[in-house]
Image (spheres, rainbow, N blue to C red):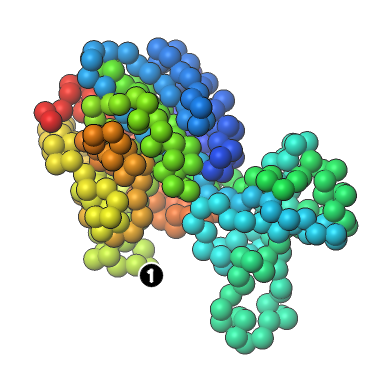
Amino acid sequence: MVSTTAELLRKLSNAHGVSGSEGGLHAVIRKELKGFVDEIYEDTMGNLIAVKKGNKFRVMLAAHMDEIGLVVKYIDDKGYIRFAALGGWYGPTLYNQRVVLHGANGPCCGVIGGKPPHMMDEDERKKGVKTDDMFIDVGAINREEVENLGISVGTPVTIDREFMQLANTRVTGKAFDNRAGVAVLIRTLQEVRSPLTIYGVFTVQEEVGLKGARTSAFALDPDVAIATDVTIPGDHPGIEMKDAPVEMGKGPVITILDSAGRGLIAHKAVVHWLTDIAKRDNIPVQLEVGTGGTTDATAIHLTRGGIPSTTVSIPSRYIHSPVEVLDLRDLDASVDLLVAALKKKPAL
């Protein structure tokens, strides 16, 4: 039975998998794709690659599985756990969050502690709590108790937050960056009927250097590639449309360039391929010239002799936080766009 968009995103968002420990997503993805692809396998890096066989023209669709998280780096004599950040956290976001430590004996609940505001001087309150001054408290009274829970140096840690429905077609949860892109890729592979050979690549370690995309693109050597990810809309207080001129609920976002050109400068023919299909089929899309982050497409398009690439993104508010927000209509429109585009190869 095929999950609805909301059900699928719920499963993916509630699953856990930081960079380098993405295996928690594999079972969800494999179950959703059973019967819809010709082959699915894991490569050396941990990328999960689903194949729909077709003709000699090869399309790579990439969505990174990893979420930003933490990793245990030190346990003190009193049982407090110091951690390192994996991915781009804004420190104050972590303060007083509840977390899950994925130890050898199974998941363990903990909380991120720090100096309470009542004990901060005025200068400390202005600056906020630094990540280096935070720690994880699992309720243990010494190091031995922590170790008996199966927690050791290197144990991955994720935020403990569950998917929730908001008003209208908006939802909130953790790790929409990039479980939203993963959902789009799954749904596309379920629905597409194409003469082309399609590689659906669920990549690893994007948040720490686009690593899985680089190695899988080299191995697969596709003719064209599209990454599915999220992007920042400028439709809420604290940010202006001139700085992020896309909106939630107005359709997927096709990247022209990101990171002010230091990341991806999309192949014009790939952008035209998608925008022409959107116009023909009356699918709402938005175009983006971004100055912020980048996606797997940056690594892919620089692989081998160059691979024509772009990104199809979901506008998502408050990314790299535990309360990301998106509009489910944008996911469905992204699937519609990719399914329509893949009916024939682009004119490169």
Q: Is residue 170 visible?
A: no
- Residue shown at 61%/65% (left/top)? 131
Image position, residue 141 (x, y; %): 88, 57
Residue 115: quarter of image:
bottom right
Q: Is residue 279 left or right of residue 156?
A: left
Circle 1: element type: loop
Q: Is residue 283 visible?
A: yes
Name the foreground residue: 212 vs 256.
Answer: 212
Q: How many marks?
A: 1
Name the foreground residue: 111 vs 307.
Answer: 307
Name the foreground residue: 90 vs 163.
Answer: 90
- Residue shown at 28%/33% (left/top)? 304
Given the image, on which type of amino acid does mark 1 rest?
A: Gly
Mark 1 Cα-neighbour bin, 10 Å: few <14, some 14–19, many ≥20? few
Image position, residue 279 (x, y; %): 13, 37
- Residue shown at 56%/78% (left/top)? 127
Residue at the extreme front: 305
- In the displayed structure, would residue 309 be above or below residue 157? above
Image position, residue 181 (x, y; %): 40, 38
Q: Is residue 276 left or right of residue 225?
A: left
- In the displayed structure, would residue 242 be above or below residue 256? below
Q: Which residue is mark 1?
A: 238
Image position, residue 291 (x, y; %): 29, 60
- In the displayed structure, would residue 40 be above or below residue 314? above
- In the displayed structure, would residue 224 be above or below residue 141? above
